[in-house]
């Protein structure tokens, strides 16, 4: 990819005969906020460590600005890493933690002071220079870890689940701050998380991973609305995933009914996976529904109710701001453009 800052070509990493990642090909562009998303053990952190130079690929190439960096040690790469546990030096104060890398570079003392002052202002911690890092809150420690990485002016910042130790409210606040910071600085962020909402909130590009392989790459809206397989559909948000039969272009047999959709290009009578998001199912009068069923449960989730409607021998999950009482007979409707058809992945 001509405009890529970093490219991975068929990169694999083997640990004692077991591959943590397999044939990863990925292009990261300048000033991009790219998130690697997936469950624990999917290979996202291994991929990040390979980019950072903390692991060497068993095969494949890592290209940075057109140059192979497979054998380049971490300290010679134009990247810095922020880890989940921050790795701050407990015996140093805030100023000393941030200035550490600059002192290693033997930068002039006055220049160090200017840079540290500027970066503290960026992370909204001016005046904390002499504070012990152990006296800071989790969110403040996270800001210091980011400041220490950014003060070295890397072209790429690697972040390995840096918000994982924070409480929910602080994590949401820091998501917005990180995104805003990345836009202001114009630095490429490569971010690792298992939190789907975090990835959707912050990213320009999401790379969904599972079992050491990339499942889908795309912007958040595409990955959410157009998942390429049942794993992505099930991992990104909630989904109703049911088996259907593609009768012809724009026509699918779903739960025993012939239903219009917007998909085409499948074989006639091909067995497919059908994905419908809970917010896209509409509860209507029983006489007006494509399917008829009964409300089995209803839970208040804050901004909506989550209801389960049993219809056509399927438990459908529905999100709606309008509560329907348990035991009520209802109809379900689906707009054609809210039905997503995917190739069915048969079990091996």
Image (spheres, rainbow, N blue to C red):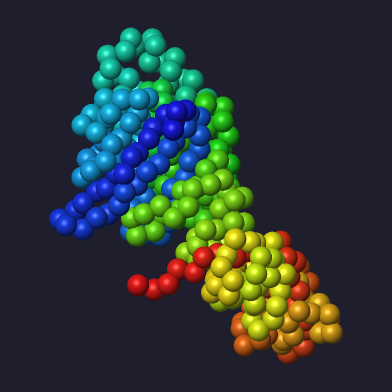
Looking at the image, is 53 positioned above or below residue 255?
Answer: above
Q: Position of residue 175 (x, y in %)?
A: 54, 44
Identify which residue is drawn at 84% across, 84% down: 287
Q: Position of residue 273 (x, y in %)?
A: 55, 70
Identify which residue is drawn at 51% across, 34% down: 32
Q: Position of residue 319 (x, y in %)?
A: 69, 69
Looking at the image, is 310 positioned above or below residue 84?
Answer: below
Res 274 quadrant in image: bottom right
List the single residue furthest toward the front. 268
* Quadrant in which the N terminus appears: top left
Examine the rendering and report whether any part of residue 235 can be seen: no
Report the label total: 0
Q: Is residue 200 left or right of residue 189?
A: right
Examine the rendering and report whether any part of residue 196 can be seen: yes
Identify which residue is drawn at 58% across, 34% down: 180
* Quadrant in which the C terminus appears: bottom left
Depth check, front residue: 125 or 297: 297
Depth check, front residue: 241 or 170: 241
Depth check, front residue: 27 or 128: 27
Looking at the image, is 101 positioned above or below residue 189?
Answer: above
List the single residue furthest toward the left. 16
Q: Is residue 214 left or right of residue 91?
A: right
Res 259 quadrant in image: bottom right
Q: Is residue 13 left or right of residue 247?
A: left
Q: Is residue 230 left or right of residue 305?
A: left
Q: Position of residue 301 (x, y in %)?
A: 66, 68
Identify which residue is drawn at 21% across, 51% down: 14
């Amino acid at each position: 990819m001509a405009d890529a800052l970093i490219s991975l070509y068929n990169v694999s990493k083997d640990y004692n005969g077991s591959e943590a990642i397999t044939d990863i090909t990925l292009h990261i562009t300048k000033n991009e906020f790219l998130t690697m998303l997936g469950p624990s053990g999917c290979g996202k952190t291994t991929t990040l460590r390979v980019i950072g130079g903390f692991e060497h690929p068993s095969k494949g190439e890592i290209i940075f600005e057109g140059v192979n960096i497979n054998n380049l040690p971490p300290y010679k790469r134009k990247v810095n890493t922020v880890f989940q546990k921050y790795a701050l030096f407990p015996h140093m104060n805030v100023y000393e933690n941030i200035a550490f890398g600059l002192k290693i570079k033997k930068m002039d003392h006055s220049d160090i002071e200017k840079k540290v002052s500027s970066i503290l202002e960026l992370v909204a911690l001016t005046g904390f220079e002499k504070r012990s890092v152990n006296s800071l809150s989790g969110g403040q420690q996270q800001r210091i870890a980011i400041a220490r990485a950014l003060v070295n002016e890397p072209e790429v910042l690697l972040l390995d689940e840096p918000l994982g130790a924070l409480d929910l409210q602080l994590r949401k606040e820091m998501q917005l701050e990180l995104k805003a910071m990345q836009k202001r600085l114009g630095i490429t962020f490569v971010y690792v998380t298992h939190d789907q909402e975090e990835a959707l909130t912050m990213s320009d590009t999401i790379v969904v991973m599972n079992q050491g392989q990339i499942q889908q790459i795309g912007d958040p809206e595409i990955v959410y609305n157009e998942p390429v397989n049942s794993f992505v559909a099930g991992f990104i948000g909630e989904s109703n995933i049911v088996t259907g039969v593609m009768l012809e272009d724009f026509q699918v047999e779903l739960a025993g009914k012939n239903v219009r959709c917007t998909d085409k290009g499948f074989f006639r009578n091909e067995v497919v996976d059908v994905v419908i998001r809970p917010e896209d199912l509409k509860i209507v009068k029983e006489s007006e529904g494509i399917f008829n069923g009964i409300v089995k449960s209803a839970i208040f989730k804050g901004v909506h109710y989550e209801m389960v409607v049993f219809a056509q021998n399927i438990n459908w999950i529905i999100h709606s701001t309008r509560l329907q009482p348990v035991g009520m007979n209802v109809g379900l409707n689906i707009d054609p453009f809210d039905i997503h058809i995917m190739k069915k992945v048969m079990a091996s």
